[in-house]
Amino acid sequence: MKANELLLWLSARREGSWRQFRVEVEELCLAEDAEASSGELPEEDDFPLHQYLRLNLERLAHVEFFACECEDGWRVAQPTLAVSWVDGGWLGILCGARSDGLQQRFAKAAEAVRLEVNEQNGVPDVVRVFAKEEHNLARLSEEAKIHFQSEAPLAMLSHLPATDPPSRGSRVTEFPQGADWKIHEFQAEQLGWRAVQRHEANARKTGLFKFTIHFQRPRYFIRWGGCTHELPRAIGLYALLRRHRKQVLRYDRTARTLRLPAICRPPILLERALVLCSGLPPVFNPRDSRLTYAQVPEDIAQLAAQLLRQNLA
Amino acid sequence: MLIFILISLIGVSCIGFIWWKKKRRRDLPKATTNGERAADGRGSGKIHEAQADPVVATRDNALNADFPLAGSETVVENKEETTELSDEVDVPKEARDIASVCPVQTEPAAAAIENDNVTAGPSFPGAIAGEVGQPIPSELEKPEEIPLTKPQKAPVYQPPRPAPPVVPLTTAKQPKRQPFVNRDSELHLRVRLVFNRDGSVRSLSLVPDRRPVMPAEIEVTGTQGDFPLTQLQERCYQDVHLPDIGLALRNGVEWVGKGATNRRWRWVLGTRELYVLAPGGDVGLSGFVSVPRLLLGDEHVVLSAATLRADVLAALTQAGCGEPEMMDETFPSVPAGWVLFRRVRPTCAVPERDQPHILNALCAKRDIEPHLVGGIRLKRRSWLLGYPPRIRFTGETSTGVEVRIDGSLADPAEDGGFEAPGWDNEGRHSLWFAGRLRKYSLQRGPENWDTWSAYNFGTDAAICGASVRPVEQVRLRSVRVPSQNTVLVGPEPGQIFRCRPRSDLRTDTCLAMVPFEPVWALPSDPMHVDKRSVRVVLVSGFEPVRPTPLKNTNRASNPTVAAWYTAINDAGRKGLALATDDANAIALWQSYRREAKRIWRAMR
């Protein structure tokens, strides 16, 4: 599984630039591995493989990209056992950096509990442990010399900001200048992007706009009350959905699954909290273009919905 | 008198000789100095830097800085490839045989390049030698900007020709210093082919070369229009997918790019009807990448015009390739008018034709070349312990090439990779083959990773990966409590913590990070809650209260102790019930109430 080797390489290098990451994805010939998993995000035709891998590594809390102390690239997170309550006991998910030595230590320490390793396409092996008592997992993490994070999904959601629109005190900015920018506006009703001209974007009082140009990552701007603010994609998207009273979250209490349109992918840390409920990345359904997060407890789903300013249907 | 005249004559002669020497040196182009330095191969990497610097043909350095000389990699390749030089430079192997991919090279240049060998001693690189005798255009002596014009037609591809015999140097004479001709730097365009898992063609694209001095992003104009190039690796830009790749491959491609400092570069792919592709692992690319010719023992893909199908098939058969798999334009993504030959593995060395011929590219190269592929590479020649590279060889190996690793004889494994005892142990290793030496190493990866903060949203904790740690480096415990019970008390009097639930969220529970092990979760204002719904919650295990002697009974001096007993007493006075009916829990709560009452009386 080449994704495992990618994580081993990232862990051995500790940190690096975005270009180094892309080169390594090429060298490990990861195109073949991820072929079956591609097509998750239909809203962008040009969602290349290295972006898909980056997304999965972030979701599963292995590596941070473009965050503090790694603004220009990536840095591997410290090994952590992310623990949460599931029916009948406690679930621990091995996240962060990985090495052969660590995996051997972990397997040895996990002899007293139930260990499970899941192979997934385009994702490093998902290592999960199950125990009746939380202190058993705490002891396991101590023996394996990794960090123990109790109530990982709740802890993460508790410290995330809500997807609120810019406040009056937020910094006002302007759209980037230049004729080479391609501009798209997000359509809240149709849940899609539509190409627009600059004068249309300037004329809008409310809207979310994506500016793309070659050589740079897309930039997202929201027009709110006639002012322009730059902000992350997901924050602006859900702020706009709330304004249009568009509810996109669906929760199945029986199956404990949370579903939403793939184009409305939540902020990465919120998505990480949802993934840490099961340790498994979301499943993309090409028929309805929705992502499904499995084994999400209701209270976590409620908290996530509140952060997204959505109602759970 | 005679002596005086003689001395004068001698002095005048000396002065004249010195003046003549100086004049001669002044008239010579500076490039020759650089070229000689490069040709004798002094210094790793520095050679490449010297070539990247202005390799001038005129006296004007500024102008010549715009035109780094093409074929500098060929100069590097004249060196012993197994030294540190190739490590530093990491030149693709096909840079040796520049003629087959860079069609602008003239015949003498191609011949000289094919003639490259280690023992020839200082000699000019083939690309430079090809320009022997060409005059320096006078306009190049003036530093004027040459406008960027769109190329109209790609140059013609020069097929490989047999290498002339090497004439060893027998005299110690310095080689003639030839002037350089200033022109655009010519870079390669490699054809790249990637297959899907099911064997169908995923993509056929062009990969432009890059030099270290070139920008990470550059706009180019060419026969296919204007578009940007983005750096993918140190030595190449990202693939360019053309809408009609078949036409481009047949008619050739020429792109010109201009950097911010008015430097110009030119990428060229000559018109041709045959491409040979080999696994791109050596250049760090997945799939197959174009090379000058077949390599004995390696798997290839051959892309040829449909009109050459029969000739190519015959040539491949002659090279011992068996029956290759053929894919024509009826297969998806195979360009119209082209045929793809897959699973081409030459086993016989075929002599080249006397004249330049396109099918000479199907005459497999005999030279034995090592390939360290696979594994997890950390640096140029260093791999992660436990994930070593596979050591394979291409070239004439049928006669039996002796391979030694760390002095021990190495044998090929089932997959063709050579192994010897201890070859994949931690440390540095030496690979010896056919009189050449190459080094590689295996190093252990780290087992400890730093704790760091990736995200901080202004709360008391920072997020990194799956961990949520307090900002202040205090050991805290995460505790889930009901949103109504925001006061946490511990077993010791004075251990009290008030949670601050978020005002923007309405949840039934919240997470608190507490600096002690809490036992009870109490409401913040027990005297004014609805005791029918609010309960006292036992948070953790049955931790008994730890009575501590009070040194000072002044309430003002012990605010935390006062807060501790007040919270417990108020909850008791209100008559709040426990959330559990467990008798042990009830008994525990009573013991806490007794202690709280005792302290209250002592401090009253």
Image: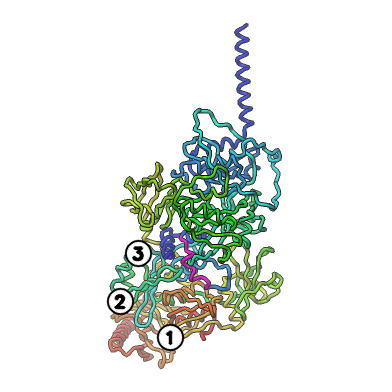
Query: Are labels 1 and 2 on one chain?
Result: yes
Q: CA distance from mark 1 to mark 2?
A: 26 Å
Q: Are marks 3 and 2 in contact (CB under 8 Å)?
A: no
Q: Residue A300: give x, y in percent of width and height.
A: 45, 80
Q: Residues within 10 Å of mark 3 (few under 14, many from 20)?
A: some
Select label 1 or label 2 by which is in front. Answer: 1
Q: Which residues are magenta?
A: A28-40
The residue to which callout 3 is attached is A102
Q: Nearer the viewer, residue B156 or B15?
A: B156
> Could you tell me the amino acid type at mark 3?
Leu
Which residue appears farthest toward the bottom when viewing the image?
Answer: B532
In terms of depth relative to the viewer, which is nearer, A167 or B468?
B468
Binning the other alpha carbons within 10 Å of mark 2 as few (below 14), some (14 to 19) or many (20 upward) gives few
Quarter occupied by the C terminus of chain B: bottom left
Chain for numbered disc 2: B
Q: Is residue B35 above or below residue B556?
A: above
Report helix, strand or loop for mark 2.
Answer: loop
Identify the image quadrant of residue A220.
bottom right
Label 2 sits on residue: B550
Chain letter for mark 1, please. B
For marks 3 and 1, give the one nearer the viewer. Answer: 3
Q: CA distance from mark 3 to mark 2?
A: 48 Å
Instruction: Name which residue type carries label 2.
Output: Leu
Residue B533 appears in the figure: yes
Secondary structure under badge 3? helix
Magenta span includes A154: no
Amino acid type, mark 1: Asp
Residue A35 counted in the magenta span: yes
> CA separation, marks 3 and 1?
48 Å
What numbered label is drawn on residue B525?
1
Provide residue A30's location: percent of width, then percent of height.
Answer: 47, 63
